[in-house]
Amino acid sequence: MSKLWGGRFSQDTHHDVEAFTSSLEIDQRLWKVDIQASIAHARMLGRQGIILQTEADQIVKALLQIDDEISSGKIAIDPTSEDIHSDIEKKLRAKIGDIAGKLHTARSRNDQVATDIRLFLRNEVQEIFEALHGLQTYLVSSAQSHTHTILPGMTHTQHAQPVSLAHHLLAYFWMFQRDRQRLADSMKRINQMPLGSAALAGTGFPTEREQLAKDLGFEFLCENSLDAVGDRDFVVEFLSSAAMTMMHLSKLSEELILWSTPEFGFVELGDDVTTGSSIMPQKKNPDVAELIRGRVGLVYGDLMGALTMLKALPLSYNRDLQEDKTFLFRGIDTVKSSLRLMHLMLTKAQWKTQKMQNSLSGDFSNATDLADFLVTKGVSFRQSHEVVGKIVQYCIEKTIKMESISLAELKTFSPVFDESVLSLLPHQAVMNARTSRGGTAPSAVAQQIEIALEFLKK
Ligand code: ARG
């Protein structure tokens, strides 16, 4: 196999070493951005008179053809190439002969690969950003139809206080909003151009990087060539955002799994997004949600893998860096497919609103409101907490629901109770009372939805 660097070697590379060092299987998905960066680089070389304009034109024309031919499947990536950069250059040589060799003037694979990854990641981040936006849009529109749908809000997975389904769904809206903000912020650092740093020290050729960056849509230049070829902070940063998104998706998955059990019965997942059992005919399993929950482990692993690979690397490029793509691409694929499948699963979910409401009956999630009532009558909260605790105990012993307790019974615990307390005890009233900004009352949730819609427009 012909190498980009064969000149100083008198022996062929051992086949085992070739297989061990090859990155083609992983990095071939960079082919399109590699061509894109090479085209811009060739144009710069021509503009600057580093190569002849006619040569630059020839290179660009051939690269555009290669792009077309790979796109249409007319030519394939050669599996014996060392990496995608060598493969594209080989294809270029096949088209235009020795002039192909001029493309690599004032460039190294070190700045080339760093540039390619950034170009590639930029597009992927945009797609993930849109997937998050789509999921958020679904959550808001579902919330709009469920501001009065009531279910138990939980702490410690125990009934705490009633909330609306809208409020519950919107909690995820804000998690995904922060994910989107994190991605947007990380773009400032992804969108910096290493190209022109050459191997590590820059180049003596009269290159020009500002216009080159503009041509490639980079917002900033990497200002230090040593840093530029070794910097993969943006990979870690992306994987950390992706890990957090997966963490959010795993929480939502977990709730869908719990909610679809007969014990909860708050949701029925679609037949086309669940799976059966080979032995138990009755089964309908939430495998998609479970796999999303499980695949969090992949992305956490990718993040730890990238951090560990980078630890204590001396300046500047080291071959260790080649592994960045293994972590990055798996992270991208996992978060993208998980977002897509979560969205699909949610659009097929049927909320069992009656079951949600029924589960509140006699659950004492109205106890805080009883205590708050005494406080409004001048009893200290500590004392009222104690009194209501006794009432809870009484209800449990007598198997009375707190919402059905009589005024006479209440009065035996405190003389302060009067008629007006009874209207506070139904769960809907409890929910409707939580009107504070960011609270679960329909009026507060309506305001929250307005704000969420504003964020979606940005
Ligand atoms: N395949 C290599 C990578 O992904 C390209 C850079 C190779 N550079 C080198 N000096 N061997 O990192």
Image (tube, grey):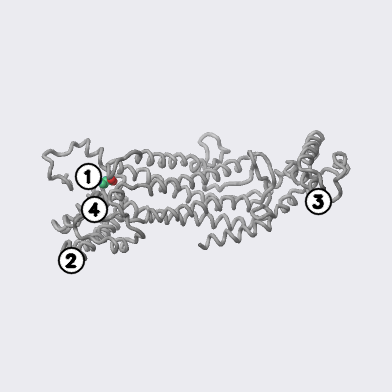
Residue beneath disc 4 = 202
Amino acid bearing label 4: Gly
Residue beneath disc 2 = 53
322, 124: nearer the viewer: 322
Of discs 3 and 1, which sits in the foreground? 3
Residue beneath disc 1 = 80
Q: Quadrant of residue 263?
A: top right
Residue drawn at x 64%, y 51% as measured from the top left: 165
Q: Secondary structure at mark 4?
A: loop
User: Pointer 3 and pointer 1: residues touching (CB < 8 Å)?
Assistant: no
- Of the two numbered discs 2 and 3 on the same chain, state the one appearing first in sequence: 2
Residue drawn at x 50%, y 44% as measured from the top left: 247
Amino acid bearing label 2: Gln
Looking at the image, residue 444 sits to the left or right of residue 429; the answer is left
What's the mark number on residue 423? 3
Amino acid bearing label 1: Thr
Instruction: Give the Cα distance between marks 2 and 3.
Output: 84 Å
Q: Residues within 10 Å of mark 1 (few under 14, many from 20)?
A: some
Q: Residues within 10 Å of mark 3 (few under 14, many from 20)?
A: few
Instruction: Give the Cα distance between marks 1 and 2.
Output: 32 Å
- Of the two numbered discs 4 and 3 on the same chain, state the one appearing first in sequence: 4
Q: Position of residue 382 (x, y in %)?
A: 76, 40
Q: Position of residue 300 (x, y in %)?
A: 44, 40
282, 424: nearer the viewer: 424
The quadrant the N terminus occupies is: top left
Does the closest atom of ligand 1 sit within 8 Å of the Cβ of label 1?
A: no
Of discs 4 and 3, which sits in the foreground? 4
